[in-house]
Amino acid sequence: MLFVLACGVVAELPTVTPQVLTQPPIIITSTDRPLTQTPAAETGLVCNSGGLYLRSEPAFGDNVLAVLYDGQAVKIVGNAGVSADMEMWQAVIVDGLAGYVDPKYICK
């Protein structure tokens, strides 16, 4: 099957054979998002951020729960992986508040 992309490039996509599911799919909602657990909770420090947003979900458009500042300690509890906006997110707890931050601003 040939497709013409918006940039004018012609791309051939492979033919995919549909598969019949033998079990119902597992549906994951935002309240039961799986985390990749770290071996043991680590402590990190906010660094070079100028104000790091602690978000309710792992996406730039989600609610800001708090603003974290350089030198502030966070407990790293897991990785949320790559979000729909193609960014990595880290699950943390700060002063009893759980949320997600951009891991490039956490120093260990």
Image: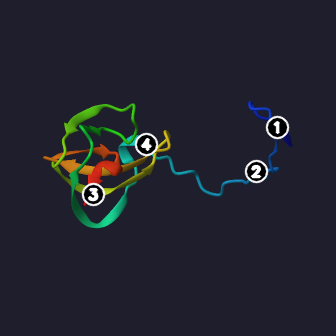
User: For this rendering, which residue is in front, 14 or 11?
Assistant: 11
From the viewer's perspective, tell me whether residue 96 is left or right of residue 65: left
Q: CA distance from mark 2 to mark 4?
A: 25 Å
Q: Residue at label 3?
A: 77
Q: Position of residue 91 (x, y in %)?
A: 31, 51
Is label 1 in contact with label 2 (beta carbons under 8 Å)?
Answer: no
Q: Position of residue 17 (x, y in %)?
A: 79, 52
The residue drawn where x is 52% and y is 51% is 26
Nearest to the eye among marks 1 and 4: give it: 1
Q: In the rendered image, which quarter contains the N terminus?
A: top right
Q: What residue type is disc 1 on?
A: Phe
Colour scheme used in the picture? rainbow
Q: Which element carries disc 1, helix, strand or loop?
A: strand
N-term-proximal mark, 1 vs 4 = 1
Q: What residue type is disc 2 on?
A: Pro
Q: Residue at label 1?
A: 3
